[in-house]
Image: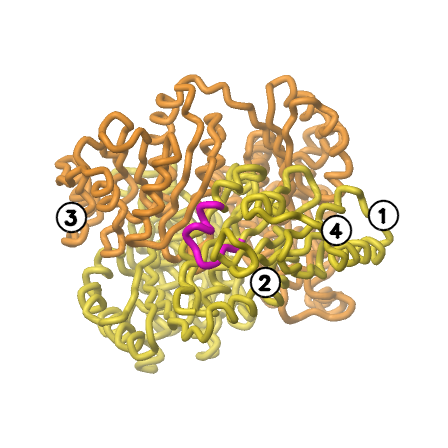
Chain colours: A yellow, B orange
Amino acid sequence: MAGFVRIEILNTGTELLLGHTLNTHGAWLGSELFKLGLRVTRQTSVPDGEAIREALTEAIGRADAVIVTGGLGPTSDDLTREIAADMLGLDLHTDAAALCSLEAFFALRGRPMAEANLKQALIPAGAEVLPNPHGTAPGVFISPTSNARSNCAIFLLPGPPCELYPMYHAEVAPRLRALAGAVTGPVVLELKFTGIGESDFHQGIDAGLAAIPGLEFGYCAHVGEVDLRLIGSASVLARGREIAIAAFARFLVSEDGSSLEESVVRLLTARGWTLATAESCTGGLLASRITDVPGASAVFTHGFVTYSNQAKQELLGVPAADLATHGAVSEPVACRMAAGALTASGADIAVAVTGIAGPDGGTPEKPVGTAWIAVAVRDDAPSAFRVFQPRNRHDFKLAVSQAALDAVRQRLMRDSRSPD
Amino acid sequence: MAGFVRIEILNTGTELLLGHTLNTHGAWLGSELFKLGLRVTRQTSVPDGEAIREALTEAIGRADAVIVTGGLGPTSDDLTREIAADMLGLDLHTDAAALCSLEAFFALRGRPMAEANLKQALIPAGAEVLPNPHGTAPGVFISPTSNARSNCAIFLLPGPPCELYPMYHAEVAPRLRALAGAVTGPVVLELKFTGIGESDFHQGIDAGLAAIPGLEFGYCAHVGEVDLRLIGSASVLARGREIAIAAFARFLVSEDGSSLEESVVRLLTARGWTLATAESCTGGLLASRITDVPGASAVFTHGFVTYSNQAKQELLGVPAADLATHGAVSEPVACRMAAGALTASGADIAVAVTGIAGPDGGTPEKPVGTAWIAVAVRDDAPSAFRVFQPRNRHDFKLAVSQAALDAVRQRLMRDSRSPD
């Protein structure tokens, strides 16, 4: 079915539009469909109730397949089933098997079935029931051939993730695979880079990538990171990858979607080294990112969050004179912190950060956003560099922790290239 | 402007449809617009590039206002500006002020501006430039009166949250308020609770809330937190609030949207106390959450991330015998950690956490998800309690840090009620 190229997702739920709930269904379905070689061409969210009618009418007019989530529950604002049937001119009838499953669901739990649940066994004429072993709402599949008003494949699925996800795998994916035929889906490669700005990155490789026929590519900038997404055949991806690596190998974090902290933990593990952290302005975020990685305990033992000058002196042995002469946010203090963390922990490598997160505490010489980052390894003098990230408090912490993790990574990679 | 009722959000970005990135912008804008008494009637996501044209054309045909995010960057797949101008028949011209801001942005950071950035100063004729002090992409506002082809107010905003959020507050909200006129929107109240499960919470107050005419309400559960959303007139809200507080005062974190960590920093500040943290399984997350709050440096000085047993002994003076006899995840060790943090820091109150984050390290007696949390204050024996949060590593850290912050909060509140 060559024309099976437009797939839309329609998520229903007032909470999505009030901003109280993040739409995780859209992202989840997008990534699952991509694994089948199918692309979501549009995702729409509408409130519960009648708003579904307009959005669904438009979607089935545009798409080859529409996947609707939510609105199959027993309450009065759950209208997806009723609206879809009405739009397509299909009568609703009670499906005997669906009713039987509903009754079994409640019997298993020793609870009486509320009358409101009865409407969940209503199915549009000609539609297929998609069993729901994890909840009360069966799904509905209206095939392109089962109704006169649309050439679109329509899936109505329940909202709760613990019901939606298994139903997708058991009922939706096989039907989509059959409808779409043998799709040789595009292959995707995501390269993560850090330490380089988006525009410099773009300038360095955009023309080269654009010259590769059949390569689809895009950029996504995060705090302290640029992701390059390449989509195409395997040979086309290899050419795109080569261009990006040739230009920016030094900044490459991963090619498999893994994060900078995962990459650091992997490098430490490979070398058999332990890491200690000494944090002022990042306030524990650096340690927390490292300990997000399973297995971090093998390479990370000590973290010092020395938020006050006194803590820097007591825990890391930073001399009071350095603090008085240079200030807490300075190259000498960053180096002393890293050296102190190395000594106090017995680790093989230590990283220290000290900076001004704001909103207060900035001066003309050291404005909010200034930070010093130092790395120390045994038998070598610590080295430090300055970063300037004038951002809000949250993003400042993230950007500085990113630069600090990258400094550790660079040091580990340098050592692995030329062992000392 | 009585008809100003349909507001749509259009989020652009291929990564949203591939499922690589969760759409947080839609939710954030939805909640911000609601504060103005405005409701989002539809949210749509489309890939980068030409797909924006169809979705934007449809949206401006339906809505009174459309807010577009993304696609204003310097790269070749950023086409929002160009497509909007083309659709509306407006020429693009280089805006002198926007160009000047761009040049200043790079000058401040001591970097040369890439040629690719020049297109970010292109603005459709008749549109207003929305300054972006936090990034390179200025926003664009096309008012209903500034073009012949649409009666819709169109905002083009940058994608990165650190640029989008301030621009919304400074530029978009005031314009929407002016366009919508004196909207007497429903009033909303959000109460945050911690330490109680969603179903117990629901069972305790649902019938009482349902009996209040004109009250719209909903629940939203997060890790270690339940939010109650009340919507209605001021008097109706007061009645709903009373029911919730009467049932669950002890679990109430805030009524103004502020987080648990903000509430803890506020209580510490009011009392003039300092806090120290001693973390094993949360790995720095507890300290990081506290230091997310502006002004934390006045009440937080020392954080110990003692991930190894050796670190617990060296930094916090936990006796080797306790570790050997009871294990690192135990009541005695949690208490020793809290007492040790108090001594080593000179703080007024200390909180310690030790647990098993997984995926490895669990035993039948202490399965993955087990943690002990201890609180110590001077001249008082530390006290500890056990929590069991069998979740993935990320959510486990979050849930345990939530319980630890709540333990500090409860202790500070108890002391403020009956001073010792």
- Report the chain holding disc 4: B
Query: Of the numbered discs in the image, which one, if any, rests on residue B118?
Result: 3
Q: Residue at x 30, y 39 (%)?
A: B156
Above or below residue B9? Residue A344 is: below
- Specify whether residue A120 is in view: yes
- Report the chain holding disc 3: B
Q: Residues within 10 Å of mark 4 (few under 14, many from 20)?
A: some
Residue under disc 4 on the same chain as residue under disc 1: no
Residue under disc 3 on the same chain as residue under disc 2: no
- Tag 4 residue: B385
Q: Residues within 10 Å of mark 2 (few under 14, many from 20)?
A: many
Mark 1, secondary structure of its residue: loop
Q: Say if the magenta span includes residue A66.
A: yes
Point out residue B389 in the picture as x, y percentages from the top left corner.
69, 56
Q: CA distance from mark 3 to mark 4?
A: 59 Å
Q: Quadrant of residue A267?
A: bottom left
> Looking at the image, which residue sits at the far bottom?
A419
Nearer-the-camera pick, B167 or A140: A140
- Tag 1 residue: A112
Q: Give the magenta part as a residue range.
A: A57-67
Badge 3 amino acid: Leu
Q: CA distance from mark 3 to mark 2?
A: 45 Å
Residue under disc 2 on the same chain as residue under disc 4: no
Q: How many marks?
A: 4
From the image, state whether disc 2 or disc 4 is nearer to you. 2
- Report the chain holding disc 2: A
Query: Of the numbered discs in the image, which one, if any, rests on residue A168?
Result: 2
Mark 3, secondary structure of its residue: helix
